[in-house]
Amino acid sequence: MLDAIVISLQVFLAVIGVYQFVFSLFGLRRNKKKQHFPPTKTFAVLVAAHNEEKVIGALMENLKQLNYPKEMYEVFVICDNCTDGTADVVRSHGMNACIRVNSNQRGKGYAIEWMLKELWKMPRQFDAIVMFDADNLAHPDFLKEVNNDLCSGARVIQGYIDTKNPEDSWITAAYGISYWYCNRLWQLPRQNLKMANFLGGTGMVFETELLKEMGWGATSLVEDLEFTMRCVERGVHPVFNYDAKLFDEKPLTFKASARQRLRWMQGHFTVARKYFFPLFWKSIKERSIVKLDMALYGLNVYIVFITFLLTAFIWIDTAFFKGPNVANLYSYLPAWAGFVAIAANVFTFAASLILEKVTFKKVYAYLILFPLYLLSWWPITFYAFFTQNNKTWSHTKHTRVVRLEEVQKG
């Protein structure tokens, strides 16, 4: 019985791995042809901020310089339970500082829900809502790009999340590699195949009417994933705009990174429990590959968890019980099969750097440490499984003040 369980799980993981690898091949090509529209959509740009006085000024300067008619967008910074000078910095730049104080409902999801209700009460209504984080920088053409998507019929858009500090440490480099990989070989294939893309927490754009129809309702620790699932469940497919770029600050240390990723995994378990089976059954009932794909994306956290358990089990069996005492899928396959699987994984990450024309020299040097970053997801996910009911939001401190021209030089 144990042999059957282990083999079955390994077969399942292998099938998922092959599925994702084949999927990634559709990201090797990028279609640069697109329809352009004059600026017609108006935008409310929301920035969620909690004690961000060190970095918020750079974003305010950045948003003033967008290549879009100034009268067609307005910036609202949600100063959420701030105890520093965030609001003063925002006002000094002539932007709207919206003060929210609620110690019981903490986190970006709750802050966004509150701000949207405030927006709906205002005399001026906007065609779409844009969401950034306080540590971000937006490409000057961001609004022009998403205006094209909205005019083409898109209702939810995810921009290209890049890294503004990839050379600061091996951890920021690892984040950068992961994001370049996801943009090119997860998001772009889904765009090319006209499937649903997933939201990334920032650089998100929503049609106002859709938000009024659905309500925000995403208050978990991973509000982006939760809203993605809600959209796909309703038949609304978020789209990815490769050219709508923004730059996000990544944690400098492993400790800060582990804390952030633990919060993500805790929230991911919550969302997977809530949405996997409804999406999975709908995918069968409607014969929808889009819903099946998104259900599997939601299941990723369990895939990481099961991979860790199986690997640990095999290692312990070999080290302490003179194994193998349990059947192993790879014992039935040629020796080269395992090497091909590892090579395929290495190829996808290396290919993403080449395809994205990454020029940061330190990033390539830090590649040698990238496997440690990938392996660190295992214990983090394992711990998250047993603490997934912890709904306490933890703030990631941002201190890296970088201007857009510095990022673009890299």
Image (spheres, rainbow, N blue to C red):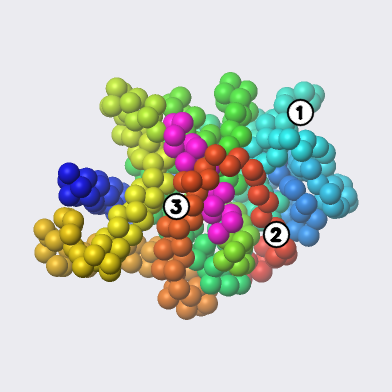
Please report whichever mark, 3 or 1, sits nearer to the chain's N-terminal start: 1
Q: Secondary structure at mark 2?
A: loop
Q: Position of residue 341 (x, y in %)?
A: 24, 62
Question: What residue would you read off at disc 3?
Answer: 382
Please report whichever mark, 3 or 2, sits nearer to the chain's N-terminal start: 3
Residue drawn at (36%, 40%) of the image:
296
Q: Is residue 15 left or right of residue 62?
A: left
Q: Position of residue 113 (x, y in %)?
A: 68, 31
How crowded pointer 3 is (Cα within 10 Å; few <14, some 14-19, many 20+) is rated as many
- Quadrant containing the N terminus is top left
Tell me the CA gap for discs 3 and 1: 39 Å
Name the quadrant containing residue 39: top right
Whether residue 73 is situated above or below residue 367 in the rendered picture: above
Q: Amino acid at mark 2?
A: His
Q: Is residue 305 magenta?
A: no
Residue drawn at (68%, 51%) of the image:
395
Q: Secondary structure at mark 1?
A: helix
Q: Position of residue 83 (x, y in %)?
A: 84, 49
Q: Amino acid at mark 3?
A: Phe
Name the quadrant containing residue 73: top right
Question: What residue would you read off at disc 1?
Answer: 118
Tell me the CA gap for discs 1 and 2: 27 Å
Tell me the CA gap for discs 3 and 2: 27 Å
Decide whether the magenta segment is chiefly helix, strand or loop.
helix
Question: What residue would you read off at disc 2?
Answer: 398
Q: Position of residue 335 (x, y in %)?
A: 14, 67
Q: Secondary structure at mark 3?
A: helix
